[in-house]
Image (tube, coloured by chain):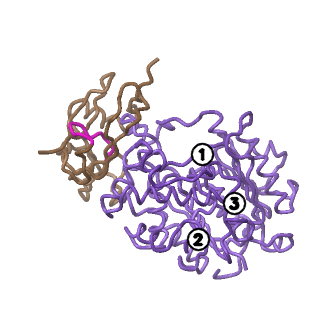
Chain colours: A brown, B purple
């Protein structure tokens, strides 16, 4: 039996994020009171502790804060090498993702990146990032 | 210490280490417990506080049953590799509060023999990793330490060789430790020639995968003075956490170890320059570089210069991870208790060829998760 990557757990507070990704939207949470953006969704603002927040669409632009080229693949549905990335969105939040469309030797910390959407399986779509420009 | 110490480490021992087939984790924890109590000159009947982690879901009741004791204080705080430094903190607090007098802290793992380690590591339902991140297939925990290492190299100008030198120094210490798992010489070229697993980290930047158990005994100041061996006083302790998943870390290079160590230094009335021997959990080589900086031994980005100037290998002026560490001595899943065991032995002068002359103070720093949890313990002898 193939050893496949785990699907994200979406039958919980993460549901809206993954529903957005399936529509081709990268969603983050914005605080109505102070405008702080955060990933992932919580029932309060981590900056001002306000309780009123909305899921909003990110512009999907940011910087490659750090990355690692994985050379030994644990899963059958993702051959090595692949690049695991920490992306710092222009809106503020950092999220874990993949860097795609970039040769491993070309990846650099702080390079500008842009979101795109990649089908995984069972209708799940992953936000991933490619070099911008 | 600001005031008189409340408690001391009075016993320390490992179980069989390395490849120990045909045992359970709890059996190794029991073996280490008995050896640590023998070392202290105490018996199971004296133990009224029990601390352990990750033997099973109900670790502390499992171990109490296997030891056939009914302790008054039970704690299976589980924060990964920092658990055992936290156990010391909690044991001292319990002793200080009069809740127990003899606390046994014990651990065991058979991860090597049971082939329990996998590249993808552990995933637990309901964590932010399971909700948002595991679908991207980071190696756990390796890729997260690699993300820190990559950013570290980017911001500081350090190189892969600077990481590799940490592994070489660890092996030089291990060569002096008869209990170490890997003792054959290791060169910089061999580390740099080992395959990259999750860049920039190579196979030889990673800790060992071994079986093993360890235990330490903590008791009150009064009881400690009545025992045969000199007490190793707990001068200070501190804990901290900043995140669980790496994406939530406030900063990839400025860690909770800064807070945990500042809390410990303040309690002890000590500063980094007062420490004679240092044990930093070296799950990966990067841990030592960022550890030296966050624990206050040098400024940010200066660790490679500090190492070059002071020397962390045998004969150097800054004795670090004198057992050979998780990189070369042993690494049964969570290394925190072994930091304490080595520090006790150094402060008692029991380390033979690798003994640090005149060591009076020691720092043990445990890290758990992906630099998620931190606990620092400062020890000293009079």
Q: Residue furthest top?
A: A1
Residue that label 2 marks: B315
Residue B341: assigned label = 3
Magenta stretch, residue numbers: A95-104
Q: Report the chain holding disc 2.
A: B
Horizontal relation, residue B177 to residue B201: left or right = right
The residue identified by callout 1 is B333
Secondary structure under badge 2? loop
> In screen coordinates, is B333 left or right of A20?
right
Assign the C terminus of chain B to one quadrant of the image. Answer: bottom right
Q: Mark 3 lies on which chain?
A: B
Residue B347 vertical placement versus B186 (above, below): below
Where residue B197 sits: x, y (%)? Answer: 42, 41
Under circle 1, the secondary element is loop
Q: Distance of mark 3 from mark 1, alpha carbons?
A: 16 Å
Q: In which quarter of the image is the N terminus of chain B?
A: bottom right
Q: Same chain, marks 3 and 2? A: yes
Q: Which residue is drawn at 46% across and 69% down?
A: B307
Asked whether the residues under marks 3 and 1 belong to the same chain, the reply is: yes
């Amino acid at each position: 039996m193939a050893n496949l990557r785990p699907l994200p757990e979406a039958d919980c507070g993460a549901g809206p994020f993954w529903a957005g990704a399936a529509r081709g939207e990268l969603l983050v949470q914005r605080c109505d009171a102070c405008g702080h953006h955060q990933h992932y969704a919580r029932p309060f603002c981590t900056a001002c502790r306000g309780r009123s927040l909305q899921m909003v669409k990110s512009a999907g632009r940011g910087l490659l804060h750090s990355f690692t080229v994985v050379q030994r693949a644990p899963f059958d549905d993702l051959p090595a090498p692949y690049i695991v990335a920490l992306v710092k969105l222009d809106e503020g939040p950092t999220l874990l993702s993949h860097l795609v469309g970039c040769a491993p030797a070309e990846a650099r910390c702080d390079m500008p990146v842009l979101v795109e959407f990649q089908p995984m399986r069972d209708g799940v779509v992953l936000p991933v990032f490619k070099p911008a420009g | 210490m600001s005031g008189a110490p409340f408690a001391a480490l009075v016993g320390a021992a490992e179980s069989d280490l390395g490849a120990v087939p045909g045992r359970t984790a709890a059996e190794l924890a029991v073996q280490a417990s008995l050896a640590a109590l023998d070392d202290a000159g105490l018996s199971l009947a004296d133990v009224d506080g029990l601390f352990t982690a990750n033997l099973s879901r109900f670790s502390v009741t499992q171990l109490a049953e296997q030891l056939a004791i009914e302790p008054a204080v039970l704690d299976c705080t589980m924060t990964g590799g920092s658990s055992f430094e936290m156990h010391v903190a909690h044991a001292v607090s319990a002793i200080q509060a009069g809740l127990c007098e003899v606390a046994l802290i014990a651990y065991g793992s058979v991860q090597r023999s049971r082939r329990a380690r996998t590249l993808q590591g552990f995933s637990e339902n309901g964590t932010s990793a399971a909700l948002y991140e595991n679908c991207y297939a980071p190696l756990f925990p390796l890729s997260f330490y690699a993300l820190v290492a990559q950013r570290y190299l980017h911001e500081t100008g350090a190189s892969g060789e600077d990481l590799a030198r940490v592994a070489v120094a660890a092996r030089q210490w291990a060569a002096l430790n008869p209990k170490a798992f890997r003792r054959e010489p290791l060169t910089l070229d061999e580390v740099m020639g080992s395959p990259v697993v999750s860049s920039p980290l190579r196979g030889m930047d990673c800790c060992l995968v071994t079986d093993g158990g360890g235990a330490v005994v903590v008791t009150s100041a009064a009881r400690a003075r009545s025992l045969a061996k000199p007490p190793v006083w707990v001068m200070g302790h501190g804990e901290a956490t900043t995140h669980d998943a790496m994406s939530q870390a406030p900063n990839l290079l400025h860690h909770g170890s800064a807070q945990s160590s500042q809390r410990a230094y303040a309690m002890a009335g000590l500063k980094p320059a007062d420490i004679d021997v240092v044990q930093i959990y070296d799950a990966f080589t990067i841990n030592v570089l960022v550890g030296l900086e966050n624990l206050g031994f040098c400024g940010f980005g200066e660790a490679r210069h500090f190492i070059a100037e002071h020397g962390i290998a045998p004969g150097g002026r800054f004795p670090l991870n004198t057992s050979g560490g998780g990189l070369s001595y042993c690494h049964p899943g969570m290394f925190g208790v072994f930091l304490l065991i080595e520090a006790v032995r150094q402060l008692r002068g029991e380390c033979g060829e690798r003994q640090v002359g005149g060591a009076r103070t020691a720092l043990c720093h445990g890290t758990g998760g992906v630099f998620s949890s931190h606990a620092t313990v400062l020890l000293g002898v009079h």
